[in-house]
Structure formats: structure tokens, C-alpha cells
Amino acid sequence: MASSVTKDVSYEDLKTLLGKSQNLLLVDVRTKEEVDKGCIQGSIHIPVDTVEAALSMQPDEFKAKYGVTKPPLDAPELVFHCQMGKRGATATTKAQDLGYVNARNYAGGFKEWSEKEKK
């Protein structure tokens, strides 16, 4: 499979992962202003234009900056999301290019999440 193919995660998939996976690293790539208005519980914020730099950091540097352990290249549950899906896909592609083989995008983004969570 070509590395340019972005694997997507559905709302249901993400909900399940958040409920059961200790290994999930959910990365919110929106702007700080967007995140301040609301975020998916358990996500960490790495703006899309800094994803490459963040994932290239040394593990101790990453942990100091983001408060979580840097995911290994073969991290099974690495999911990016933005507001509507486009920046999440960009971040996912960047991560895949750096060797994060299982990086995926939650294509519905925070927009879909917040709509479904209100029900």
C-alpha cells in the first residue's frame, strides 16, 4: 500500500479506542484558538505546522513539551484530528513520511465529534 494513502478512523472507532486503548495518542492539530473552544478529552495539542518538528524531537524533549511519552514509530494507535479532516490528513501524511506506519486521521474531526457527543 502506498504511503500516501491516509487511513481514516471513524467516530465509532475513535470512541472505542478512547474507551479501551491505553496506547492511544490522539493529537489535535488545530490552532490554539480552536482548541480553547473545546477539545476531545484525552487529546494532546500539536498544531499542524509543528507536527513534523514535534515528531522529530528527542523523546525527553517531546515529553517535556507535551507531557506525554513520544510515540514509537510503530505506535499502534496514533490518531490525528482537526476541525473538519483536512489538516488531520496533512498531519497524518507527515507522520507517515517520518516512519509512523500506523498513523491515522479521524476524518470527521472535532466538528463531527462535538455534534455526536451532544446527543
Image (tube, rainbow, N blue to C red):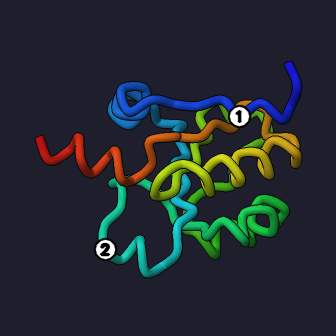
Compared with 58, 14 (above or below) is above
Please, what is the three-letter code of the amino acid marked with disc 1?
A: Thr
**Quarter of the rendering containing residue 72:** top right
> Circle 1 — which element?
loop
**Quarter of the rendering containing residue 17:** top left
**Residue 4 falls left or right of residue 106:** right
Looking at the picture, how far across and down is residue 32, in whole percent?
48, 79
| Among the two numbered marks 1 and 2 on one chain, the one whose residue lies closer to the N terminus | 1
Please, what is the three-letter code of the amino acid marked with disc 2?
A: Lys
Please tell me which residue lies in front, 58 or 109.
109
Q: Residue at x 36, y 26 (%)?
A: 12
Please tell me how crowded label 2 is: few (under 14), some (14-19), or many (20+) other residues with Cα within 10 Å. Answer: few
Q: Residue at x 36, y 77 (%)?
A: 36
Determine which of the numbered discs, if any, sits on residue 6 in the image: 1
Determine which of the numbered discs, if any, sits on residue 17 in the image: none
Looking at the picture, how far across and down is residue 38, in whole percent?
31, 67
